[in-house]
Image (spheres, helix red, strand yellow):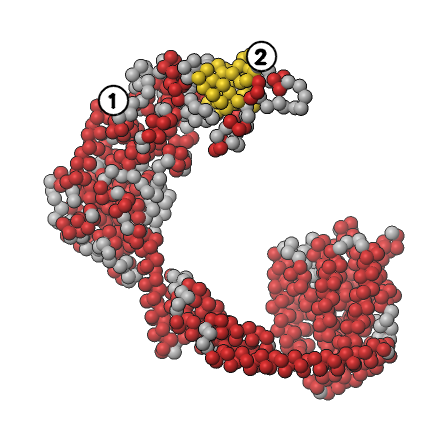
Amino acid sequence: MPPLEQFMEVPSGQKRELFFRDIERGDVVIGRITSIRDFGFFMVLISMGSGILRDIEPLEISALCPLRDVPSQSNHGDPLSYYQIGDLIQAAVKDIDRYHEKITLSLHKSSLPSHLSHLKLGVVSNEDMPEYYKHSTAFSSSNDTYEKVLQQSVALSNPSTVEFLLNTLGIDESKPPSLIRGLQRENFFEQDFAPLLRRKQSSSWALKCVKIGVDYFKLGRHVDAMNEYNKALEIDPKNVEALVARGALYATKGSLNKAIDDFEIALENCPTHKNARKYLCQTLVERGGQLEEEDKLLNAESYYSKALTIDKSFFEAEDALNKVRQCIQKSMEKREKHEEKEEKTKEKKTETSAEKLRKLLKEEKRCCRKLKADPIPAYGCGFSFPIQFLGILKMLVLHRKKKRKRSSSSSSTSSSESSSSSSSYKKRKKSKRKRRHSISSNRSRKHSSSVFTQEDEPLSPPADTSASFLKQDDLRICDSQDRPHRKSIEFKTRNRSLSSSSLDFIEPTGGRSEDSRDSYSSAKTHASGGTSKSAASASKYRSGRRDSTDSYSRRAEVKRRDEPEDSKRSFSRQNSDYYQSKYSMSNSGPRERRSIGSSSRSHEQSLQGSKSTSHKEDRNGNGSTSNDVPGNLLNILSQIAEFEKEKGVKQKCK
Amino acid sequence: MAEAGAAVSRPPPPLYFSLGEMEESCSTAPPDKDKAGKTHFRIIRFIMEAGVKLGMQSIPIATACTVYHKFFHETALDAYDPYLVAMSAIYLAGKVEEQHLRTRDIINVCHRYLNPGSDPLEVDTKFWELRDSIVQCELLMLRLLQFRVSFIHPHKYLLHYLVSLKNWMNRHSWERTPIATASWALLRDSYHGDICLRYEAQHIAVAVLYFALQCYGVDVPGNESAETQWWKVFSEDITKETIDSIVSELIHIYTMDTEIP
């Protein structure tokens, strides 16, 4: 709004008088330079920048800004040379001589009061003029009334202005002033206010629900009781009684972890609640017992000790804790002995690793046959393989790392490489087991014998893996270059995001796991790495439909197992990916378990899995819509083969 | 304490208002105009207090009061239970001014006001019936007011006037006297009567400011020598008489406050 005195048309003599009375040190003024002298410059004030926003332009008040208050703009020369007559200057009032009506200004920041320290002193432009000044000049040209100007201003129609103005005027809305005796704020009690009343009401309401729930519980209607407890917690999320009751219900239902959570929250909210403490201890001990049975002694121990920290006099927990600790010691000793044994065997094995491996493979073959007849005991003999494979794996990894360092094209994969190598031990074991099983169930003897012969040169892989490794790097480069091949990559990385970052992650791991498989499946692999990989698998498809789906599913299996890890690694995944990995996680969990449990079923499962994934592909539209799954796959696989060949060519070119 | 006294002198109306009972509960309402004014005063005080406890801002409260006054401007006081009308007015004002209030809170606070020290109502059929009656009454009010429930309040005018005045006044004399707070309080209190219905918003704002300045003996500088008086600047069509009559009504409200326990 324009200044009030402008509307009131106060005589300028009085305005001037009032201005010199009211202006204070630290106020910000804006003026125009009229003359520059040796000792400073004079300016005529046209507007106020802070404090009292007055109409001062017509008063033609001149002020001096002495030389020592002008900060030098550069290291050399006269600071005054920077300014010209007619410049708009924002300055702070440094001193006022009210009697002689003289004002001294300063351009130094230090002369500003602390709450205005963000203001910039010096030359300003026309746009920087305060709002009120613009209004004031507009007013002097139009001569509207105050009412009219106010009605036109946005500030009047904006409802949040009220809040803002209340703040600037220092009126507190939360403690509204009143002159009526009954409405004096001190007469109100805090507990009469809405939030407190509401809380009180909610808690009593929730208690009622809990009571009903407890009644249900006594009648044995657990579902109804749970519903009531949940309702109570919805009304009052921190209701201790409801939490304890629900925890007890969970405990009786057997979901001890949930029960423990509830009790813990209840105790947090009300640390003195006796029942909560008691129940929590009991549940913790029970859960510990469960874990003990599952042979997770360390976890059990932590549960017991937790129970003890909550209630020191809980002797049950103490007993259990001591027992568990003894058990742990025993098992530790056992393990040590076992490890010693293993080491011995390992030493022996590494001495003649190549020879041994051949033997082991023979053994494996035998196992496979045995597995056919009697699947369950066969697992016992699988035990010694991993150690051997670990040795090979280590060699592989070491070699790759060396290569890595030499090429050092990108660092992103190397980290994933090393991190996954530890887990790949397990993976390999698993895939191997599966392989054995699938061989036994599906493959002809010819196949398995070929496996054996190929396995002869397990020490040669370094050369070929490095080649395939380079290829992986290449793939990344290619990926960004040739778009038309994207589709085939897409197939490989099924439904994963197109972003090359996720490809980076997936390719190495996928490649490796396939690698392991390839060393079984065909001798060609060693010659040309990944290219023949797919070719080989394609040829397998040709060999029999059933067979091909099986191998595909295996591949899918391996990949799926990789996927959760990948998803953990790359946060940049898109939603669909997330869904995909979720899907695979939920799928692979039970499948893995089952594959250990019953072998014949796992095969069916993986068959189903392969079907479902291939259906998914169709839906995701990789360009093919036919329902004939194997034929479809064949097409895509041959595409991959082509692509990779091309890639190989390109690599040579480079 | 005022509300405790009120509870003793006048038994609080039953909290269970079915539509039939509503009319009965107010059969004792005084026919006399002065007595009606006192009842309104009491109810508005109730609205104000409930509003504060509900954390309402000044403008929603003002809307609630205006709705209430307007409602009883249209109908007789003994036709409906004023407390129920007041509760509905609060609820409606919350909606109009975009400060949504929940009926549960309104019922809790009002119940507590009428039955000091009691526990909040159980959430049962009685509660739900009370809630329904509030919603019903809200509909009735809307129809009676022909759905014209958005008002121009003097609050925003007053604030702008205060800002303008602050820039013209000497900083120290402004800080010495709580003119802003006082005028804000006066404005809020003015709703105890039906001033808001009979005068324009700007006029009320100017009068309130005038009264506050007078109370503290503060003069607007340069007012004597100026071409236009400050109050004339803020509102062109206001006369000294209007200001005086509004001020005298304000004084009347405060005398009523001394009469009503």
Residue at position x 79%, y 65% in the image:
A397
Q: Is residue A234 left or right of residue A317?
A: left
Label 2: which residue?
A37
Percent of width and height locating residue A83: 60, 18
Within 10 Å of disc 1 (Cα), the crowding (few <14, some 14-19, many 20+) is few
Badge 1 element? loop
- Distance CA(mark 2)–CA(mark 1): 54 Å
Badge 2 element? strand
Q: Are marks 2 and 1 on the same chain?
A: no
Q: What's the chain of the residue with tag 2? A: A
Camera sees residue B111: no
- Of the pair A319 and B197, the residue shown nearer to us: A319
Camera sees residue B195: yes
Residue at position x 73%, y 71% in the image:
A425
> Hey, what amino acid is under mark 1?
Thr
Q: Is residue A31 left or right of residue A176?
A: right
Q: What's the chain of the residue with tag 1? A: B
Q: Is residue A538 above or below residue A45?
A: below
Q: Which mark is residue B239?
A: 1
Percent of width and height locating residue A32: 53, 16
Percent of width and height locating residue A408: 80, 54
Q: Is residue A179 above or below residue A350?
A: above
Within 10 Å of disc 2 (Cα), the crowding (few <14, some 14-19, many 20+) is few
